[in-house]
Every structure is written in C-alpha cells, then in structure tokens.
C-alpha cells in the first residue's frame, strides 16, 4: 500500500525511513529530524466503491494533524515537550530523540535511582501544568508518548487527541465528550506509578466510559515511592493540575531527592504563544 505526503508525493513504506506509524499519522526520518505527517492512503488504484470511506478516513487524519499543530502553537516552548523545529504544510518537524519512548526504555534498561525518578515525575507534572494553564486537555498520557532525550530528560509527544478549549473556559470544570482535567490527572497518576515501579501500568478511562475505578480496584501503593501523590491522582483529591504540582514539589523536597533543583521556581514554562 502506498501513501501520500501533504505535497502530493506518493511513497511506500520501503521507500522512506519510518520512525513510527499510528492510527492517524506517520513519522518519517527527515535528515536529522522527525517529520510527522497525516496518514493519508493513496486511493488512485482503489476500487471506486471503497474510496468514499477511505477518503473520509484520510480527511479525518488530516484534521487531527492540523489540530496537533494548533496545540503546539497554543502551548508554545516547554522543556518537557518534544522540541518543535517548525510547523508547515509539510507537517510537524520535531527534534529526533534516539533513545526512544519511556515504555521501551523501562522495558530494556536498568532501573534508574529514586532521585532520577523524582526528577522525571516532577518534570511530567510541570509539563502537564503547562498544558492545563494553556487550556489544553491532553487525554493520551502514557509512557509510549514520552520520549527519553540524550541527557535523560523526558519529552512528551503525540497531541492529536488533545482538546483545545476556549481561552476563557474554566479547564477544571470543562468536559470534552467526557475528557476532563480530572481524567488527565488520573492518567498522569498511572504514568507516575509506572515510573515508580519500573513497569508499564495503564488504566484508560476512555475505555471505561470515563468511569473512575474504585481505589480498591487499583494497585495498592501503600509501600511505594510517591504513594500519596499516586493515590490522590486516582481518587480525585487534587482539584487541579496546579494543586498536584505544588503538592508534588513539597513531597519531593521532603524526600530529599533534590528533584526540584533542576527546575524553575515557578510552575510555568517559557515563551507561551497563546492562540
């Protein structure tokens, strides 16, 4: 099967260097960068009776990438997000992170120490605060959507499922077809737990019809690092991402991990371009 780039060029999997492919997009190696483009199938040789449905899927995939472009423009520069080199008709050009995603890293590498885990946890929470303070709900918060940089810092990617809320909306009261700030905090708790136990753990609220499971149906965290943070994420004890951020700062400082020393004293990243 062949695909079509935004400029109309047709290509096959064996003619390009693929870094990844998902339901809606394809990521290609573009010299020293990663280029994310919509997953658009070439329909020229497809029987007529199938084209309408396939063209609908192609258009949805184009719109999802356009939405992701808008997310990058809204949130702006942030240390915890994959560096966006530029946005154009060609797609989204990103920095290349050769260590791969955090899920694969945890599966293949030796467990990092508690100090590193603490820095990672606070970094992800700080990055999520940037999204929420930009009135963006993220939804797909998972290890596979976090890349590991050469310096072992973490970079979030893949924002096609995000909800771009109006700038005057109250993000902590808003719902986008069931997606809420509390759902983001719950999923973030799953990522934090995965880092702590050094094993992937997911509980997707979308799959559950946005119904939060009872704490007794989730893993027992009593004896793990950051137990209170994880438990409170899962039980909706935090009223906002900002409250979670300051609670995590206090906890990690008390843990004597030096986790907060690498970050700015304020919770927000720089150079936001609000649109």
Image (cartoon, rainbow, N blue to C red):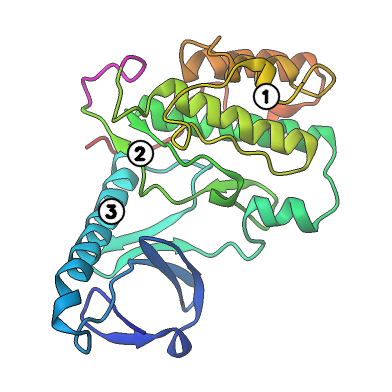
Please, what secondary structure does the residue beneath circle 1 have? loop
Residue 249 showing in the rendered view: no
Horizontal and vertical percent position of residue 192: 66, 32
Horizontal and vertical percent position of residue 230: 66, 21
- Callout 2 environment at 10 Å: few (<14), some (14 to 19), or many (20+)? many
Asked if the residue at tag 1 contacts the one at tag 3, i.e. Cβ–Cβ closer than 8 Å, the answer is: no
- Give how far apart the Cα atoms at labels 1 and 2 are: 32 Å
Please, what secondary structure does the residue beneath circle 3 have? helix
- Give how far apart the Cα atoms at labels 2 and 3 are: 17 Å
Q: Which residue is under mark 3?
A: 64
Residue 121 showing in the rendered view: yes
Q: Which residue is under mark 2?
A: 75
Picture residue at 58% right of the left edge, 14% below the top: 235
For residue 251, above or below residue 112 = above
Q: Does the magenta stretch include residue 160?
A: no
Horizontal and vertical percent position of residue 43: 21, 81
């Amino acid at each position: 099967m062949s695909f079509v780039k935004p400029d109309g060029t047709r290509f096959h999997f064996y003619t390009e260097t693929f870094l990844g492919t998902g339901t809606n997009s394809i990521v290609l190696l573009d010299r020293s960068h990663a280029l994310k483009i919509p997953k658009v199938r070439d329909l020229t040789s497809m029987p007529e009776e199938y084209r309408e449905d396939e063209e609908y899927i192609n258009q949805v995939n184009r719109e999802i990438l356009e939405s992701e472009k808008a997310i990058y423009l809204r949130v702006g520069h942030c240390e915890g997000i994959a560096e966006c080199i530029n946005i154009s008709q060609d797609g989204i050009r990103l920095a290349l992170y050769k260590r791969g995603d955090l899920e694969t890293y945890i599966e293949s590498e030796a467990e990092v120490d508690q100090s590193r885990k603490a820095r990672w946890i606070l970094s992800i929470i700080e990055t999520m605060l940037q999204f929420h303070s930009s009135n963006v709900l993220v939804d797909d918060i998972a290890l596979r959507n976090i890349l590991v940089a050469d310096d072992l810092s973490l970079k979030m990617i893949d924002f096609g499922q995000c909800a771009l809320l109006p700038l005057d909306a109250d993000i902590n009261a808003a719902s986008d077809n069931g997606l809420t700030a509390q759902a983001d905090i719950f999923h973030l708790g799953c990522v934090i737990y995965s880092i702590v136990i050094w094993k992937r753990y997911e509980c997707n609220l979308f799959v559950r019809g946005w119904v939060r499971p009872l704490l007794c149906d989730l893993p027992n965290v009593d004896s793990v690092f950051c137990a209170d943070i994880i438990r409170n994420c899962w039980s909706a004890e935090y009223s906002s991402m900002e409250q979670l951020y300051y609670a995590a700062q206090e906890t990690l400082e008390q843990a004597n991990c030096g986790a907060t020393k690498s970050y700015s004293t304020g919770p927000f990243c720089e150079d936001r371009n609000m649109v």
